[in-house]
Structures are given as structure tokens and as C-alpha cells.
Image (tube, helix red, strand yellow):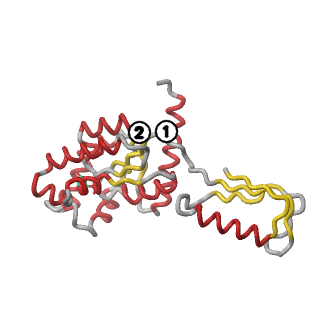
Amino acid sequence: MTVITGPSFRVGTLNRFRERNRATARPTYPEAGWAAIIAGPSLETMAGMGDIHGIRLVMDVRPPLSLSCTVALVGLMGAGKSAIGKRLALRLGLPFVDADDEIERAAGCSIAEIFEKYGEADFRAGERRVISRLLDEPPHVLSTGGGAYIDPDTRALMRAKAVTVWLRAELDVLFDRVRKRAHRPLLRNGDPKEVLARLMSQRYPIYAEADVVVDSTAQPADRTTEQVIEALRAHLQQAEKTPA
Ligand code: S3P
């Protein structure tokens, strides 16, 4: 919370101050709570050119939650793990990391090439190593590939070292999101909608073990991000109440 007090601000000064702080606050906290003027004995209209005396200006730029561990997003392909993850990271003031990008960087080739050259088992082993390394890094928002949480060892690591959030989505939502891109190897074998439906029935009971579950619908990603924050807040409050 930033509290600025001043005996006398001209309106122009106030507006410049506000603009400047909005500009700096925005990249990290897109909706910086701009709580405004909370007291003033002789407050003249903001639209006019009069002086404002004795104001207290309050701007809340705190992240909406304080987290001491990584938030790991899990869910099927198309669940919105990257889109929501990036927004969530901005809102929480944490770095965003995409596990699949890290795997590709470590392997020096694309995920499709890893599947093609070495097969899925080797991909899962590499995924486990990379996620294990990332979970030892300072808190961040981690987007994980759809199969990561299904691997028992990777899941155990994530459950031990992160708060896990399942972005649960219906088949039509998933399909609508994935059908525009052809880079996912698992969706190249057979009808993508059928593959997704099969993976849903196999994987949803396992994703359901996540700490937090949020529905990822066709609504704007910003709104889903706010729902993730609310769900995380409720989870953390519950965890505080539950004795270890
Ligand atoms: C996979 C999902 C992909 C990627 C790989 C395998 C899966 O990530 O890790 O193609 O098993 O569901 P996204 O969920 O980010 O598409």
C-alpha cells in the first residue's frame, strides 16, 4: 500500500502523479487498485483547476495474494494453462515459466521432434527432470504440459513443492482452442476430438487431485484468472486453518 500525503497539490500535479504511477504499475499489476483520495478538508473538483489541500492519496499496488511457493497449472491441451498462467503471473507479480518451452530449450528441439525421435516415455522422463528443476527455483507460475500431472512421479513432485491448479474445461472448449494449431503430437494420431475425449476420461479423475479446481470456459481469460486468484485465496485460507 502506497500512501502519499501532501499539504497542497494542484490538480495538474495530482493527475500527472496518477498517470505516472498508473504507467509504472500497469506492467506488473494491470488493475492496480487506484483507491483515490480518502480525506481532504478542502477538496475542490478534480475537473476544475483549484488547489486541493491536505489530501491523502492511496494507491494499492500490492499483488492480490502472497505466495511462498510455485503455482503449477495442470489440465488438458487447450485448457488455457499458458494464457491464464501469463495473466496470473502478472497479477501475482511472479515470473511465468512454461515447462514445455523449458523442455524444448533443454532438448534443443521441438516437443513433436522429441516424440518422433525418442518416443513418449523418453519425453516423460525429460519432462520430469525439467519440472523437478523448475520446482526448486523461487516461486513462479508454472504452466505444465497436459500429461505432466498424469505421470505419478512428476505429480508427486508437484504436489510436494507447488500449489496445483487444475483448469477444467469441457470438450468443445478444448477442441475449439486446439484445432487451430497442429504442433501437438498426441493430436496428430487420429481424430483430435476423439483423442481429447479419451484423454478426458483417462485423466480427469487424476487432475481432480489438484489442490484447486477452476473451470476454464469460453469467457474472457482475465475473468478466469480472477477466479483462479479467488480459488487460491480460499485454498490458502483453508490451509492456514488446517493444522499440519
Ligand atoms: C501433452 C501436452 C502438451 C505437450 C505434449 C504432451 C499431453 O502440452 O506437453 O504434447 O500429454 O497432454 P500442452 O498441454 O501445453 O499442449
Quarter holding ligand 1: bottom left
Residue type marked 1 = His
Mark 2 surroundings within 10 Å by alpha-carbon count, few (fewer than 14), some (14 through 19), many (20 or more): some
- Residue at disc 2, secondary structure: loop
User: Could you tell whether 195 is left or right of 42 in the image?
Assistant: left
* Count of numbered circles in the view: 2
Q: Residue at x 77, y 59 (%)?
A: 37
Which of the 4 image quadrants contains residue 180? Answer: bottom left
Residue type indicated by callout 2? Asp
Tag on residue 211? 2
N-term-proximal mark, 2 vs 1: 2
Q: In which image quadrant can residue 125 be found?
A: top left
Circle 1 is placed at which residue position?
235
Marks 2,1: beta carbons within 8 A? yes
Secondary structure of the residue carrying tag 1 is helix
Residue 240, horizontal then vertical, whole percent: 53, 31
* Closer to us: 180 or 5: 5
Rendered position, 107 above or below 212: below
